[in-house]
Each structure stands twice: as C-alpha cells, then as structure tokens.
Image (spheres, rainbow, N blue to C red):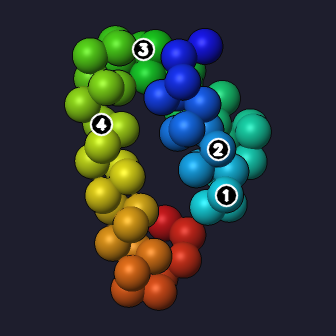
Amino acid sequence: MPASLKVHMRNAIRLGATPEEICKVLEIAIGLGLHTAMVACPILEEVVAAQAYLGQGRL
C-alpha cells in the first residue's frame, strides 16, 4: 500500500471517519477512476482543514 494512502486513511480515521466510510469512498473512487481520486484527495484535505479551522467538525 502506498505510504500516501496510509496517511490519508489515518487522517480520515483521526477526523472521525469509520472504516466502512473509508471503504465506501474507495469503492466510489474505483468507479470514478484513480486519476479523479488523486485530484479529489487534496481537495478533500483542503475542505476538511477549512472545516476544522472554522470549528465545524464533521462534514
């Protein structure tokens, strides 16, 4: 497993995602294609960071 994927998974769990939610996201990513997932992950990180900064908790 690539190290970057482990980082994303650890961060998702740290932010409250369940293993089931992560698996669902991976299923969706497979359907959309790896390229789309690679583009979307940094955007998701930005959104999550902004939410945390604003104190809005879970998405």
Which residue corresponds to the image point at 74% horizontal and 48% vertical from the top-left?
A: 18
User: Mark 2, residues whose alpha carbon is within 10 Å: few (<14), some, or many (≥20)?
Assistant: few
Which residue is painted at 54% across and 77% down in the image?
57
Q: Position of residue 49 (x, y in %)?
A: 38, 66
Q: In this rendered view, identify the residue nearer to me: 47 or 6.
A: 6
Q: CA distance from mark 2 to mark 4?
A: 17 Å
Mark nearest the camera among 3 and 1 is 1
Is residue 55 shown above or below 43? below
Q: Are marks 2 and 4 in contact (CB under 8 Å)?
A: no
What element does badge 1 sit on? helix
Mark 3 nearby-residue class (10 Å; few <14, some 14–19, many ≥20): few
Residue 9, how many percent across, how many down? 61, 38
Q: Is residue 7 left or right of residue 34?
A: right
Residue at the farthest bottom position: 55
Nearest to viewer (mark 2 / mark 3): 2
Instruction: Give SS at disc 3.
Output: helix
Q: Circle 3 sits on which residue?
A: 31
> Which quadrant of the view contains residue 26?
top right
Discs 2, 1 touching: Cβ within 8 Å: yes
Q: Which residue is mark 4?
A: 40
- SS label for mark 4: helix
Q: Which residue is mark 1?
A: 14
Question: Which circle's residue, 4 or 1, is located before the other in the chain?
Answer: 1
Amino acid at dot 3: Gly
Choose the circle earlier in sequence order: 2 or 3. 2
Query: Residue 10 — which label?
Result: 2
Up the image or down, 37 lies above or below 56; here it is above
